[in-house]
Image (tube, grey):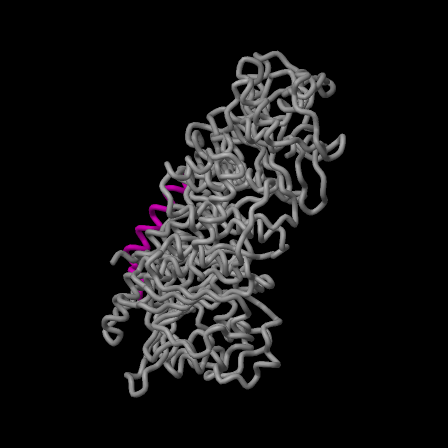
Amino acid sequence: MTAAEISRIAGVTRATVSNWRRRHDDFPAPSAGTESSPLYDLPAVQAWLRGRGHTSTASPAEELRTALRLLGPGSGVAARLFTLVAAASRRTPEELAELAALPDDQLLARAEKAAGELPATVPEAEPVHYGPDDAGAVRALLGCAREAGAQAALDVLAERELDEGAASGVYQTPEGLARLMARLLPVGVSRVLDPACGSGTLLAAAARQGARELFGQDSLPVQGRRTAVRLLIAAPDAETAIRVGDSLRADAFPDVTVDAVLCNPPFADRDWGHDELAYDPRWAYGVPPRFESELAWVQHALAHLEPGGHAVMLLPPALAFRSSGRRVRAELIRGGALRAVVSLPARAAYPLHIGLQIWVLQRPEPGGTDRTTVLFVDGEGEQRDGATGTPSPTGAATAGAGSRSRRSGPSASAASTPTSSASAATVDWEGLSERVLGQWAAFTTAPDTYADEPGVARAVPVVDLLDDVVDVTPARHVRATAADIDPAALARRVHDLHGQLAEQVAALASASASGGWQPSGASAREWRTATVSDLARGGALTVLRAATPGTRGSKGPAAPTVDRPVLTAEDVSTGNPPSGGAQDLHADAAQPVAAGDVLVRAVASSGRQAAMTRVADDRDAGALLGQHIHLLRPDPARLDPWFLAGFLGADDNIASASTGSTLVHVTPGRLRVPLLPLEEQRRYGEAFRRVYELRAAVRRTADLAADTAVTLTTGLTAGVLLPPDTPGSAGKPRAQEHRSV
């Protein structure tokens, strides 16, 4: 294990581990590695820590990761442990503790026997044999299953397998999204298929909704095993059939039809088999274009449905409007297969910068009723408004009534402009589900009498969709028209915005007042400086978390569950309270933020003028740390926090401690701070705090001014607001004004 891993286990910094090595002769000697990157024996380090009263602060999942890493790449231990997870899920915590306490030989023999009792539902699972080197990993797995649950242990094993197999672009469908998709299915669905099942999140959600026959297929063996074990844990009474293989080229269930399909398929896959599958009978709505693999998955899902069965699929937004897929979209609409399209906010699922869409499809029934409308629901609007605290300009009311294997990334388009992954608020799955499910229930109950809700949902006649574009983007159809806007409500909204803007301008004027700024003299002040590393060694501050570029955060097979907000890098710049969620969490985020901590952005765009540092306040206290943030905790008796933040965030300081060109990566230990008495530090600190408040006031004023301008433009162009009287037109009849124009 590395020094960094020792620091995580012991709950100390890497500098402390280095000090232990220098000061304690009995500290375990390196057993491998190099002089600059030594590796240590885990049992020896644990014994040394116990002897000095240090208890492990690493989570059970992190201890399992460490045990797997110690066995090295290519050991295959993670694959051998999959079946043991299912066996562990059927034991009580007391039984797991007893097993973990056994001597190595007895432990491994019992583990082999327990894993061998697993039903033959795990694809490509072979009889396992555990060798002496596996004892540490087996114990860590049992501990993880006992303390964090079998699902957490399963996710760690899958993470290890995917890393060793260099499988890129494998993301788990968020639990909230999986629940929403499963709840869009009719009540009473029993047989469900996921042809790109990944981690089995969607099938597990279907089981919670009452499904009892579950079919899944994935091209990655590790994902197939993962789904099978997950379903043994989550739905032990269900009948499951999980297969490994390419669902489009080698369908494992060619003769199976089901009540429903849930799927989060690969996006933008150019090697999906276009040429060899050109005459496939599944393409009832037209041959999918070469670069529209998603339309192949849509028709694959429809082909597996019983007449009247539903498919709910997560798809990229470009599929709704790309010209290459126009003909197939038209046939899906004309044939009554496309029932609804729901837009999701960015960050609902990977890729985080794109707002994905849910398509709800239904296989037509012979002789069934013609479907004359398609429902569109804007699930983005509520997140947009909620993130800023600002209602939409129209004043429209809001609704009140599995992991996938990415063989290539989704194609971004002009309609899906990338944004910072840390800039949006955490998805409110409960509110979003209420918004979507209420509209879907009303639409399916009485589609002919469904009442549109401007700005939220609209049922669009099929004939209006079958134009030259066949664009099924929800935002295009849901947005409120002039007839939907209440002129009096919009006028009140404008009045409120002007009042808020006036208050904010006054606050900006106060923040920008030049009081007491004096020149330092004929030349700039000179002072001695010290680096952050020097200050840390001297005890003036502690580097609690030094983010490293490229560190895995939530991008991976599993996103952790958190019960508190996450402070993001964007929050550091904007001054907003913590706005992130599990998807923003750093892999090593055990240390919560405290008031007075100094936060430094670890990554920034070259030339960007956003604030790079900030002092945490009471709003941030207790939040977890997101990705790409350095966390420094100064000793208040020796360092003023705002003094420290101000000098650390200076452009020259950041430039001298950074690497990179387009994106710069800040090394906190190289940042320099003047050595000044505490009283003088506080004077500088108060000045830096005022500068930060000025920057935040400018941003708030600009946002409010932009919102006011958009609202006024909407009202004027929609004909619901009249221009104010000008000096030349005062008293002039409106009709005469119109004629003069």
On the image, which quarter does residue 467 sit in? Answer: bottom left
Q: Residue 663 appears at what percent x and percent y?
A: 67, 45
Tell me what residue is drawn at x 53 percent, y 16 percent: 636
Q: Seen in the image, is 168 located left or right of residue 360?
A: right
Which quadrant would the C terminus be assigned to in this image?
bottom left
Is 91 situated above or below 440?
Answer: above
| Spot occupied by residue 520 in the image (x, y as percentages of width and height) | 67, 18
| Residue sitting nearer the eye, 401 or 481 | 401
The picture places residue 59, in percent across and down from the top left corner, at: 48, 35
Above or below, 477 against 58 in this view is below
Relative to residue 48, is residue 116 drawn left or right? left
- Visible residue check, residue 656: yes
Residue occupying image coordinates x 45% and y 74%: 253
Locate the N terminus and report the quarter of the image it occupies: top right
Q: Nearer the viewer, residue 455 or 721?
A: 455
Q: How would you classify the magenta stretch by its main secondary structure?
A: helix
**Is 494 in the magenta?**
yes
Span colored in magenta: 484-502
Residue 682 on the magenta span = no
Q: Residue furthest bottom?
A: 367
Residue name at image x 41 percent, y 68 percent: 193
Q: Is residue 285 above or below residue 232?
A: below
Q: Position of residue 683 (x, y in %)?
A: 56, 17
Q: Is residue 353 visible?
A: no
- Residue at the image position 42 percent from the left and 35 percent from the top: 97
Q: Is residue 526 positioned above or below 699 on the image?
A: above
User: Which of 593/423 is in front?
Assistant: 593
